[in-house]
Image: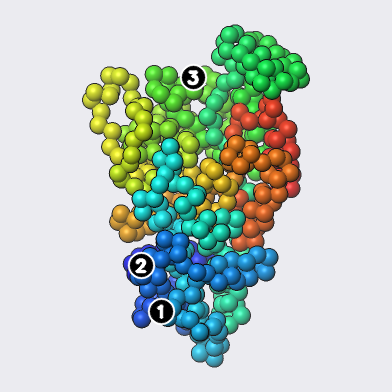
Amino acid sequence: MLSENAIKYALRHLFAVAIPTDEDLDFTFEVENERLHIVFADDCRIDLALFSDEEREAFLNGEASPTLLASADKNIQIPVFTPQSALGTRLDGQYAQRLLNIPYDLVTPSFALLSREEEYRGLPRDEHNRFLFAYSLTRRYDCISFPLVDEYAMLLRQWISDYLKPNITIRPRAYRFVPTHDIDILHRFTGGFQAYKSIYGRDLLINHSLGDVRKSLQEYRDWKDDHLKDPYISAIQELIQLSQQHHLSSIFFFKAIVPEESDCTYDIAGEDVRFAIQQIRNAGMEVGLHGSYNSYNDSACYLKEMSRLEQVIGARVASGRQHYLRFSLQRNLFSYQNRSIYTTQEVASTQVSHQNTLQVWQEAGLQHDYTLGYAEQPGFRCGTCHPYPLYDLDNDEPSDIVEHPLIVMDGSLFDYLELGIADSNQLIDRLLGRCRAVEGDFVILWHNHLLSRNYRTRFEEVYVHLLRNS
């Protein structure tokens, strides 16, 4: 059965979403005979069913049989799980006794999704050591398109209001649109021969676009006059301006590596990087760390990169997102390549440890992370679109790192799912609607190098369209 800390963690999130108030809601609970007895708000009581150990294991294996229940706003059907001990009982409340009986286990699924417990179980991973959507609970229970934990919380709000009517002022949380941008590449042009291959090889021979060729030639001439006019640097300025126009604040994640290291596409100490970062900070927007490919399980690497970025921006780095969305809670990681972020001289004297990603972030003092979304599938990997503290499964306690789950990435739409513009907008609209319904945050990732050439139409008709209608 779940530990006391695990139960408290899941309940805190459910109550925080269900009953947002000026202060955290106080509650107590005890477990008895696979029932969870909760007391809050002047003796309001909730009795909630819990899985047995065998049922919990079946749930985590994707073998539980849910019942579909209408969401709080009646717009979708969501899976709920009735333990054997609660079969034949129904949801009811006794206002006179201040008691609400819930025959579903809302806690075990919530903890599994929030804590990423399913990723701790040694299931197959992809070539980048990423947990696969194909093996996830959100696929097995068909709930990637809505935030299951938050949907439970909104049902809980409805049931508490209908049956208990506590003397609590609920202050609905304002939905937020959160634009984020990973700066994987800062330069389209690096020299004459490279520009020739880019323009005539890609724009003409591959994309068959004379319009792109003409525009690219003009961009190349501008770059030759002033390297700070590179299209990918100009794209950062355009993203800043778009966010300002729509009263939003973007977060830009920069890699902090130097040319002698692998995974380096720009020098964090370069004048062009400092120029781009200054534009962002002048607009009052945030710069975060885009942890390099190998930093996700190596504290020494991550700390080095954080220190470099802090030197460039002259301030503490609070937020991060891992390159390739690499994240692992497992300590024993397979290795399919031998690339190192270290120079040849450093390799001999440096022992790269295999730590889990949460450990790496904790040791670096990171405060906010934006990594947790699936590369291959937009949606609600963590079962929530609310910021929440990640759980330290090794120590069975909440961590100090607040996760901001990623809902949509541009590459997920166009590269993994190969969607067109209309289908992309339709999918985004569905996800955005559920974020609004549960008063959460819609975190989107759009890369700066996907604003030009054959990507321009997608950028304007998907990302810009979204900003206008969000």
**Label 2 close to label 3 by CB (< 8 Å):** no
- Identify the amino acid type marked 2: Leu
- For mark 1, give the secondary structure: strand
- Judge whether 253 appears above or below 185 on screen: below
Pointer 1 local density, CA inside 10 Å: few below 14, some 14–19, many at least 20: many
Residue drawn where x is 66% and y is 21% of the image: 206
- Identify the amino acid type marked 1: Arg
Residue 336, horizontal then vertical, whole percent: 36, 33
- Which callout, 1 or 3, points at the residue further toward the start of the chain? 1
Residue drawn where x is 25% and y is 28% of the image: 350
Near-viewer residue (250 or 1)? 1
Instruction: Please name the residue that numbered disc 2 is placed on.
Output: 2
Near-viewer residue (212 or 232)? 212
In this view, the mark in front (2 or 3): 2
- Which callout, 2 or 3, points at the residue further toward the start of the chain? 2
Residue 34, horizontal then vertical, whole percent: 38, 78
Q: How many marks?
A: 3
In this view, the mark in front (1 or 3): 1
- Judge whether 291 appears above or below 234 on screen: below
Work out how far the residue at label 1 is from the one at label 3, CA to CA, in angstroms.
60 Å
Instruction: Please name the residue that numbered disc 3 is placed on.
Output: 270
214 horizontally vs 363: left or right: right
Residue 437 visible in the picture: yes
Residue 93, horizontal then vertical, whole percent: 55, 85
Work out how far the residue at label 2 is from the one at label 3, CA to CA, in angstroms.
50 Å
- How does the figure colour the protein chain or chains? rainbow
Residue drawn where x is 30% and y is 44% of the image: 332
Residue 250 visible in the picture: no
- Identify the amino acid type marked 3: Gly
Instruction: Please name the residue that numbered disc 1 is placed on.
Output: 35
**Label 1 close to label 3 by CB (< 8 Å):** no
